[in-house]
Image (cartoon, rainbow, N blue to C red):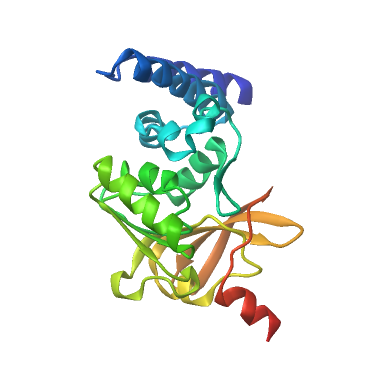
Amino acid sequence: MLSTRIAARAAAVLVFLAVLPCGCSSGEQAYAKMRERMVREDIAARGIADLRVLESMMRVPRHLFVPVRLRDVAYIDSPLPIGENQTISQPYIVALMTESLGLGDSARVLEIGTGSGYQAAVLAGIADSVYSIEIIPALAESAAALLDSLGYGNVAVRSGDGYFGWPEKAPFDGIIVTAAAPGLPPLLAEQLAEGGRLVIPVGDRRQDLQTYEKTSSGLKLLSSLPVRFVPMTGKIRKEGEE
């Protein structure tokens, strides 16, 4: 039964993708074909069903968010190095985390760990506004410049420690953390709106991608699955040492 449902979803996605306009050069058409294969085989076929997520990932040019030398492999379902000992996440994980947020069109989202800016771009195709914090200044600067050049006007990037969130823009309908924290950062939970969701990898040697929903009585764990992310740095690490 499960395989039948997945096959039906994949068939629906194929029809959906077939009608998306490209309007691109021959070089860009090649990347568009790789992107379509990625979305069809690595994302939709594995159960991601939110058409807004699939459409956003179909439109975002992942090859522009990786180093030039890696553009030919930009659409494989794997994390890739982006410099500064950081990586761009595996496309399936980006899709899974985005879908797990359950965002509406008017959603305000906080991202901790901008990296190359790819996850922010995917979120920008779904949410009303995205606020992204990157602790490494060089990455924050390059991601902001790239997102601006690609026309993602609803994304704001700043350099800082994501542990503290972005309180002046709170509350957020969704918060996504793209680096593994040893525990839940308390200030992020405070900045989450009631009914909003927090998606975060938690743990050190063993990590689990956890999705929480904020209720009137606190955070409720919705799901958890094993993952592997680079570690979150900054205040949260110092806190663990105190």
Q: Answer above or below: position of 185 versus 31.
A: below
Answer with the quarter of the image where residue 203 lies: bottom right
Whether residue 20 sits left or right of residue 205 in the image: it is left
Is the N terminus in the top left, top right, bottom left or bottom right quadrant? top right
- Name the one closer to the observer, 113 or 44: 113
Q: Which residue is at 67% across, 79% downward?
A: 240
Is the C terminus in the top left, top right, bottom left or bottom right quadrant? bottom right
Visible in this render: residue 1? no
* Percent position of residue 81, x then y: 58, 43
Q: Which residue is at 58% across, 70% downward?
A: 184
* Percent position of residue 63, x then y: 44, 31
* Percent position of residue 174, x then y: 40, 58
Visible in this render: residue 42? yes
* Percent position of residue 2, x then y: 62, 26
Residue lying at the far right in this picture: please name it: 205
Q: Which residue is at 45% across, 24% downward?
A: 35
- Name the one closer to the observer, 4 or 86: 86
Residue lying at the far front in this picture: please name it: 69
Q: Answer above or below: position of 52 versus 17.
A: below
Q: Answer above or below: position of 133 versus 8.
A: below
Q: Which residue is at 47% across, 15% downward?
A: 11
